[in-house]
Amino acid sequence: MSDTNATTAPTGFAQRFLDWVERAGNKLPQPVTLFAGMIGIVLLASLLFSLLGTSAVHPGTGETIKAVNLLDSAGIRRIFTEMVTVFTSFPPLGLVLAVMLGIGVAERSGLIAAGLKGFVQIMPRRLVTMALVTAGMLSSIAADAGYVVLIPLGAVIFRSMGRHPLAGLAAAFAGVSGGFGANLFLTGLDPLMAGFTEPAARMIDPNYVVDPTANWYLLAASVPIVAVCGTFVTERILEPRLGKWRPEEGQEVPGEGDEAATQDLTATERKGLTLANITGGVLLVLVALVSFRPGSVFRLEDGSFGPLFAAIVPLMMVLFFIPGLVYGRVTGSVKGDKQVAQMTGGAMSDMGAYIVLAFVAAQFVAYFNWSNLGVIFAISGAEFLKNIGFTGIPLIVTFVLVSSLINLLIGSASAKWAIMAPIFVPMLMLMGYSPELTQAAYRIGDSYSNILTPLLPYFPLIIVFAQKYQKNLGIGTIISLMLPFAIVFAIARILMLVIWMLLGLALGPGAPLEYTP
């Protein structure tokens, strides 16, 4: 690829495989339809396995667990009388909607976009690539901001430096999507994942609690690893492959806003960002002060931080809402309560599709639990794996790889985990692995393969951004650019998880690797 602005889509087996993935994925129904179909399967399976007298002995209690028919009169009555309660008590629903109230103000006031732009622009030139990848990971605080703001900004910044813009676009895309989940801060995804993991864990242990901080240590430690790997791939593999950027020979289409994207933040934006950061810092200090002394607001007399962990989501909402409000007042994007109401309302309207998905997913999870099929499959699967000797690190690594393969066909992280958690969390608990570890393994597998699947909702947008610099660019070109990132990220993050397990480190506050009944 040297000395040319064009890239070539993969040919032969690789191209045929990618074409098959695209065709197969496009034939899958939407997540709502997928869950509706799976509800039907669960109902029919509950009838079949109850008629067959399927059962399993719980290894912890010695109780015989039998399949329950949900299509008899009692089952149908329960489905209809508890349908609304199942939906409103669905753990991820309230958690996600609450935190999005705060994120909506921070995003729509311009705080998050200004923060990302400022973070990249203050970096020395030699650290720009690493700053782009890191900012991409941090942007998962508000997922859309990274895709819409940072990825095109990466291309513009690289072009302004005389570097190939597609390399800047790829570096930002790798951070936003390939490094998905790795973050120094808790995001809306953390309570969402925990909300699916906890009900699955309670199929084995009715009192088990999974905190939003369950994977925080591992994911925070992943940030510098992914940043270094992304920088290495960009500068040592991708840029030499792309060659020198020659706009006079390329097919670049001038776009609006390029100059603005590379300009420094205005004085007003800087003032707003500074005051918002100070406000956020003061809020964090206040939280620390009321959590420091045993018996204080967010700490129990015995010194445990249970109340703090339980308050994480409301605290996240406040930590986004108030700095976003401060930034908006300084810059003029928030002039009064009307704008705040519009911002929070807009955030909720953006969650409409998720609310519909949550309704159907909640019914699926409930029916799967009521039928006892999840527990029976988990016990049978755990016994099978133990009998063949497939345990330990090979088992966890295999689960990571399986998660990444499923990710190629189902784009939604929450949709996949809602399907997988009720099966794999109980199964691995019975083999001695904590729900937090299973969740961490899933999140790693759900990250690095994002940048390879055309089914990623934002993939068409990435192509549009890239076609600004190469008119005839297509799916194959993007995937060929991102494949080195996916391979290196996969190796690095899986290896990191293995080392974490070998050292026996906690995945988050009070989140062990092992499960002991």
Image: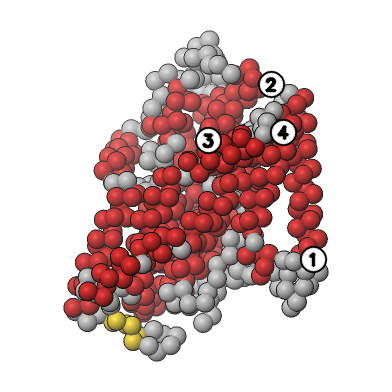
Residues tagged 2 and 3 counted as in contact (Cβ below 8 A): no
Secondary structure at badge 2 equals loop
Q: How is the image coloured?
A: secondary structure
Circle 1 or circle 2, nearest the eye: 1
**Precedes in sequence: disc 2 or disc 4:** 2
Amino acid under label 1? Phe
Label 1: few (<14), some (14–19) or many (≥20) C-alpha neighbours in 10 Å: some
The residue carrying mark 2 is 263
Note whether 174 is above or below 222 in the view shown: above
Residues tagged 3 and 4 counted as in contact (Cβ below 8 A): no
Circle 3 or circle 4, nearest the eye: 4
Secondary structure at badge 4 equals helix
Q: Position of residue 125 (x, y in %)?
A: 71, 29
Secondary structure at badge 3 equals helix
Relative to residue 59, is residue 335 drawn left or right?
right
Label 3: few (<14), some (14–19) or many (≥20) C-alpha neighbours in 10 Å: many
Q: Which mark is residue 329?
A: 4
Q: Tell me the quarter of the picture where residue 474 sits.
A: top left
**Precedes in sequence: disc 2 or disc 3:** 3
**Precedes in sequence: disc 3 or disc 4:** 3
The residue carrying mark 3 is 147
Q: Tell me the quarter of the picture where residue 134 sits.
A: top right
Q: Position of residue 140 (x, y in %)?
A: 57, 44
Tell me the residue at 45%/36% (across/down).
Answer: 458
Label 2: few (<14), some (14–19) or many (≥20) C-alpha neighbours in 10 Å: few
Query: Which is nearer the eye, 63 or 23?
Result: 63
Amino acid under label 4? Arg
Amino acid under label 3? Tyr
What is the spatial separation of the Cα atoms under label 3 and label 1, in whole angstroms?
38 Å
Q: Tell me the quarter of the picture where residue 176 sits.
A: top right
Circle 2 or circle 4, nearest the eye: 4
